[in-house]
Image (cartoon, rainbow, N blue to C red):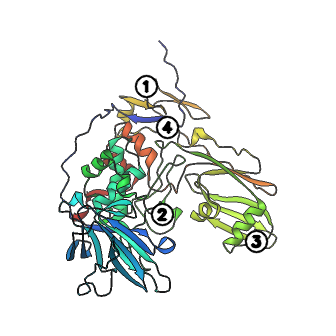
Amino acid sequence: MKKKALALVLTLLIVMGCVTFSGAEELISPAPVADTYIYVGLFYSNSAVKEATFTSDEGFIIASHSRSGYSEIQDLRYYKTLVARVENGIINLYDANGNSVLDTSVVPSGLGNSTALISAATETDSRIITVNGKKYREGVVFGAYAADQGTMAVANYVTLEHYLWGVLNSEMGYENHIEALKTQAVAARSFAISKIGYHGGGALGFDVCTTTHCQVYSGMAGEHLKTTEACQATAGKVISYNGKVATAYYHDNNFGYTMSADEYWGGSNGWCQSVRDPYSKPYEWKTDFTFEELETRLKNRGKSVGTIKSVQVTERYDNGAVKSLLFKGDEGEVLVSGSNITSWFNLRSLGFSMSGNPDPAINKGSSGGMYAKSKTASEVLNSTISVMGASGEVQNIDISAIQIYNGKETTSAPFRITDLSVFTDELVTSGRLYLKGLGNGHCVGMSQSGAQNMAKAGYTYEDILHYYYTDIEICNYTDL
């Protein structure tokens, strides 16, 4: 019986060999890790506060603190509610009745960078403190701004692993596959360690913030049993590059390829290279600008060219992403490159087509198309592939029966996919500038969408990390 040719589209994910899909997962015994503490900015700069209210069912202690732990200097276990208030550049601490509770013999200058307010609970997992009604683990540290400003910065002083409990469900929801969640846990842990001291300076230097600028952190409100289990199953695990913890950048989804960190931001990030990514289901977006809007955006960046006469894509990266845009005006021209393109014009990604017409063309059939993973040619010829569609349905097919249509020609296995140009360009000289793109985020490093689909296809978290990050090792951070 003649077998039907299969037309494969972008959303198909193809994996060589017999795939075993995991069901319920048993937690591995986590490797012992030190209680490394990090500092997470809650209120600072424009969000700095004049006062903050704290509660703890177990009462409080005031302690000196470091990354390796803390030492009690004043017992406040009797108090369940305390209020920190800035007065003349000094941070004072009061009980619920307005009485000062600081022992000036041990805290002579009020609360500051050297002191922490911590839950007095004996058990580590029970140390919970509310900050203006929101629950966090462990405690907080403070920093006063100038006296005439009258505000203070507050950061959560929390163990690295507890911090991750508040990150994971916010960055990748608990409903996802456990191997994808483990991947996210290792990536988030690596990112956090590599960013120690990132938000230095100001009234209070801290490591990471709570937003997408770093990683989304929701405190205890963001925790879920399944994501906590993923953190525990990978406790202490990080990715390293050349013997150092690597900044594990990650993003939502891309346009069939990831971006190199060097291309997007500059610098030297050998572990974040561009890789072909058929696993990431791309987000499609559109936007448009009048020439007047473009002129204003350039002017706001100090790059005015006067009245714009033309806009042109002058170069693309090998993966199809826009490398540079040239704006020509009656007062000069300016070339905008890399991440400046997305930030200056608030674009979802660098993967886009540009036109003077309302619907720029995107050749979706070539933005990754399909991918076959194998170690040897004989595996291609003597095995089956598992095809998973967007619905998640998986079907095993003999490789010899496969024919592939890539938008231009049909080939039979063993096969090679010929990449076509995904995006189209036009020189736009008047009217409106229309963009249509694929992908959401900087597209550097691991795709969260891709990790989820790889996990569904039977890959382990180690497989996924090695796929998205180049020449890395997975190890315990305490060993580095």
Q: Residues within 10 Å of mark 2 (few under 14, many from 20)?
A: few
Judged from this view, the residue extending furthest toward the front is 97
x 60%, y 60%: residue? 342
Circle 3: element type: loop
Gap between marks 1 and 2 measured at Cα: 48 Å
- Residue tagged by mark 3? 305
Tell me the quarter of the picture where residue 458 sits: top left
- Residue tagged by mark 1? 400
Q: Which one is earlier in the sequence, the residue at label 1 or at label 2? A: 2
- Position of residue 145 relative to residue 308, above or below, is below
Q: Which one is earlier in the sequence, the residue at label 3 or at label 1? A: 3
Identify the amino acid type marked 1. Answer: Ser
x 72%, y 59%: residue? 312
Identify the amino acid type marked 3. Answer: Val
Discs 3/2, front: 2
Q: Residues within 10 Å of mark 3 (few under 14, many from 20)?
A: some
Residue 204 horizontal/vertical position (percent): 40, 77
x 68%, y 51%: residue? 287
Residue 158 horizontal/vertical position (percent): 30, 65
- Residue tagged by mark 4? 370
Check residue 213 in the rendering and tell me which mark sits there, or answer none.
2
Gap between marks 3 and 2 measured at Cα: 30 Å
Residue 376 as seen in the image, left or right of residue 306: left
Discs 1/4, front: 4
In the picture, the quarter occupied by the C terminus is bottom left
Circle 4: element type: loop
Residue 365 horizontal/vertical position (percent): 59, 38
Judged from this view, the residue extending furthest toward the top is 1
Q: Are marks 1 and 2 in contact (CB under 8 Å)?
A: no
